[in-house]
Structures are given as structure tokens and as C-alpha cells.
Amino acid sequence: MDNPVTEAPAVPVSRRDGEADTPWLDAREQRFWRAHLEVGKLLDHQLSRELQAHNLAINDYEILVVLSESPDRRMRMTDLATATLQSKSRLSHQITRMETAGLVLRQECPGDRRGLYAHLTEHGWETLRKVAPDHVRSVREHFIDRLTDEQLDALYAALAPIAEHLRGLRGRG
Amino acid sequence: MDNPVTEAPAVPVSRRDGEADTPWLDAREQRFWRAHLEVGKLLDHQLSRELQAHNLAINDYEILVVLSESPDRRMRMTDLATATLQSKSRLSHQITRMETAGLVLRQECPGDRRGLYAHLTEHGWETLRKVAPDHVRSVREHFIDRLTDEQLDALYAALAPIAEHLRGLRGRG
């Protein structure tokens, strides 16, 4: 599974390496960190697999959602790359695939020199409406419904400040 | 940000669509689900950025760790694909890149017809040892040290059964 070394490497390390100062995770931190990574990765994998029944990658689904929530269901490509944390070149490849599938359309905006927009097409919108009920059932079955209300609130209270911290870092590019 | 529609789409949906039966997430579930996705994605992004200082992608780091923890620091390519949840073709591309960087070596095992192994090289091992202290500091700074001991235990208690559920599904491929 996903095993970033955050405990000391298996082979003894001498003090000369300066690694004696490393704040390795203890066993309790380590088991949590690995569970966090594992759930993230396996859940992504499972949701992806279930979206494949609709011929959608999980990244496609994300793009459909972001565009559906934008004014006029469109977004400047550079903003879409920022919103989805992708490089412009990777996003460009993805949008090309999605354009071929008729889900989005790339267009210049008359009078706006700041580049291309991605638009959600009617087919893209209908696809999202059709797929969303299955997707929410998957999210419930594999994740949300496995948590009590108390766990849900405790998790949110733990994660929200971390999300804020990370958003702040990201702004500093 | 990462916004999978798990609440009803913004535009009113008539009963004829059968979506009235969809168990949309309520506001409390929704805010947690989005925070979970956001932290996963932003943390991955931040850790990736810090690993870039060592010329490593986050997936490269994962491969180094998995190999370092395997007997003889090697693993059959098919098992490595399973362990890292990657397709064989995607893993193959990654290992080719890492081979060029001298971090791993692909070799057939004499007497074993079941294919190629990826080996961790001495340079790969030294790289992992050099990078791990910085990586653990990043994981602490951006995540672990932002949680209290109580939160850590509560989160682990919530995530561990979900990880087990997802591992089980995965086996059923």
C-alpha cells in the first residue's frame, strides 16, 4: 500500500547522518498517517471504478461539477487549472478528451484577450445529472454512511483548519 | 476546488427524473466530504512540491518506500502495480523514468518465469534516506502536528474500518 517513510528507515542510521534529529512519527502517528493515505487512495480508486460504468474518469467528473457551479457554466482555462490543481498542459489534454466526448467545448470569449474558456455543453450537464445520483450513493456506501454523526463533526473540526492552512500556502505559490 | 456533486444539482429537478429518491448529502455531510477531498488534494500538492526540491515526484517516493520495505528490496512488477494501485502500463512508464535516474533497476529473475522485478538500487536507497527526514518534517508541519492526540485517535478509529472495507472491495476486483 501507500507507505511513505515517516518512521526511521528500517536499517540502523548512525548519528553522523544527522538523522538523529529527525522527528520521526511514533507508532500511533504512523498508523494514522498510513490509514489516512490508504483511505484516500482506495476511495479514489473505488469511486473511479464506479464512475467508469458511465464512461467518466474521476477527474472528468470533477471538471463537470466545477463548470456546473460556475456562472454561465463556463470557466477560463487558467482558472479551471487552478481550481482543479492541475498543470495547464495536463488540463488541456483532459479537456481535449472531454471535448471529443461532447461534454465540454473550448471557446475564445469575444472581447476577452485573456484566453480560452471551457464551457459545459448541454450533453455535459445532462451527463452530470444522470451520473450524480449513482455517485452520491457510492460516496455514502463507501464512506459517509460508515461514520457516525459525532465522527463526522469531529473529523470536520480536525480537517477544516488544515484545509485553511493548506489553501494559504497554495496562494503563496 | 474539488467539488463532486453530492448534493442535488443547482437546477430544480422534477420527480420524473427519479432523482427524488436520491439520498443527497445534507449540508453537514457535504461540508465534511468537501473538506476531506480538499485536504487530500492540497496535502498531496504541498508534499509533492516539497519533494520536487529533491527531484522526486510523490509517486517516485512511494515506489522507493515500498521497495525499501520489501524482502531483498525488490518486488515483482505486477505486485508493485497492485501495491501502488497503478495500472501496469502507467507503472512501467514510471519505472522507466526512475531507471533513467538510477533509482531502480528492472531485471528478470533467473528461474522465475513470472516476469520482471523492480529492484531498489544503492542510489535509490541513499536517496530515500536523504529525503525521508525532510518528508517527515513536511508531513508533521502540514498535517500531523495540527491534530491533537485525541483527534489523531478519533480519526484513526473512524478511518481504520473504512480502510478495511475498501481493501475487501478491491480484492473482489
Image: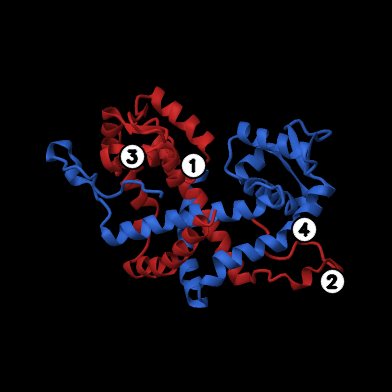
Chain colours: A blue, B red
Residue B33 picture location, percent across and down: 57, 63
| Numbered badge on residue B90 | none
Mark 1 closeness class: few <14, some 14–19, many ≥20 residues within 10 Å: few
Are the numbered discs 2 and 4 placed on the same chain, yes or no? no
* Depth order, front residue of A101/B116: B116
Q: Residue at (78%, 44%) from the top-left corner?
A: A103
Helix, strand or loop under label 3: helix
- Chain letter, disc 2 residue: B
Residue B144 picture location, percent across and down: 36, 57
| Numbered badge on residue A130 | 4
**Residue at numbered disc 2:** B15
- Chain letter, disc 1 residue: A
- Chain letter, disc 3 residue: B
**Residue at numbered disc 1:** A172
- CB under 8 Å between callouts 1 and 4? no
How many numbered discs? 4
**Residue at numbered disc 3:** B67
- Tag 1: residue type? Arg
Could you tell me how far apart the alpha carbons at marks 1 and 4 are, in whole angstroms?
A: 38 Å
Q: Residue at (37%, 33%) from the top-left corner?
A: B118
Residue A87 picture location, percent across and down: 58, 35
Could you tell me how far apart the alpha carbons at marks 1 and 2 are, in whole angstroms?
A: 46 Å
Are the numbered discs 3 and 1 placed on the same chain, yes or no? no
- Tag 2: residue type? Arg
